Image (tube, rainbow, N blue to C red):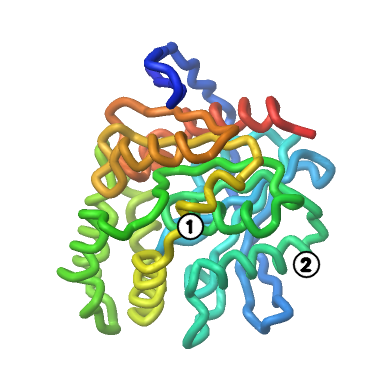
Amino acid sequence: MLVMDYSPHSSKVVFTQAYVGRRRMRQVTGAKSVSLRSGVRLEYVQQGDPSGLPVVFLHGVTDSWRSFEGVLSRLPSSMHAVALSQRGHGGSSRPVAGYRIVDFSSDLDAFLDKLDIPAALIVGHSMGSYVAQRFAMDHPGRTLGLVLMGAFPALRGHAGVPELWGSAVSTLLDPMDPRFVLDFQQRILARPVPRARLETLVRETLKVPAHVWRAAFVDCLESDFSKELATIKAPTLIVCGDQDALFPRCDQAALHAAIPASRLVVYPGAGHAFHWEDPAQFATDLVAFGHEHRR
């Protein structure tokens, strides 16, 4: 598979042949939950050596920790991997309010305290990448590095997501229509995924109440941290698919230009959820980045 890496300060574009390591897959089991000081209960899974590099995964809107199941099963046991379901999602509690990006970031801070993790490599997909950006700005000492997947600097003036809000999300009602959820998940794919994986993702999305959809979308649409991106000092890997139907390459390039210690990798032929389409490729790149920047 070819990947692209370039600097915003140079016209040089480098394509490299990336080796996709086919690690022996492990089944991810043993979901737990922890109650934060706010009273919010978060579902999570963890695996690997507790003394290894801590890596915390943040899923996108309406997903859960299972969004990363295919990646987790391919990580080495030397890595301390933790994936959580953010408030309102998966098996976590669903309060009436508190779905701003700053709320999710505060949850992450309290979650790390509960698990006695001083600092971690933070991996975020889509909305989770926005939470990761906010966390790195507010808690630089707890951020060993960032991996931003299918990310964006801001949604004001954006085309795709506001259109999705106006045409569908703003009027959602419970119970959720499974056909709408299936269409929602399929539209972020550029390549097919195993049927069992897609069915799991749809089941997880059906757990999310309509009020969580609306509140999370509204704050993503209204928040704008783009002027603060230059304050992020953590080494940052920005990864996207060149067929991302939500956040095109220009969004990733804007992040890359704004975050000083960042690197951009583009997967040819991949969609917004490239970690569902080819979890082995992403796991390989994540492990390499983690080894490169482990303190």
Number of residue marks: 2
Task: Report the front residue among 86 and 135.
Answer: 135
Task: Report the front residue among 157 and 281.
Answer: 157
In the rendered image, the vertical position of residue 222 relative to residue 228, given as above or below: below
- Which label's residue is closer to the chain start, 2 or 1? 2
Q: Furthest residue to the left?
A: 167
Query: Are there few (<14), some (14-19), or many (20+) residues within 10 Å of tag 1?
Result: few
Q: Which mark is residue 225?
A: 1
Residue found at x 42% / y 65%: 223
- Asked whether residue 185 appears in the rendered view, the answer is yes
User: Which image quadrant for residue 42?
Assistant: bottom right
Residue found at x 25% / y 59%: 184
Q: Nearer the viewer, mark 2 or mark 1?
A: 1
Q: Give residue 190's position: percent from left, percent from top.
A: 25, 39
Task: Report the front residue among 271 and 90.
Answer: 271
Q: Is 253 situated left or right of 105 in this image?
A: left
**Amino acid type for the residue under numbered disc 2:** Lys
Task: Report the front residue among 151 and 243.
Answer: 151
- Secondary structure beneath disc 1? loop
- Secondary structure beneath disc 2? helix
From mark 2 to mark 1, how far is it between C-alphas? 27 Å
In the rendered image, the vertical position of residue 91 relative to residue 227, given as above or below: below
In the rendered image, the vertical position of residue 71 relative to residue 3, given as above or below: below
**Amino acid type for the residue under numbered disc 1:** Phe
Q: Which residue is mark 2?
A: 114
Residue found at x 57% / y 46%: 123
Q: Give residue 147's position: percent from left, percent from top.
A: 55, 41
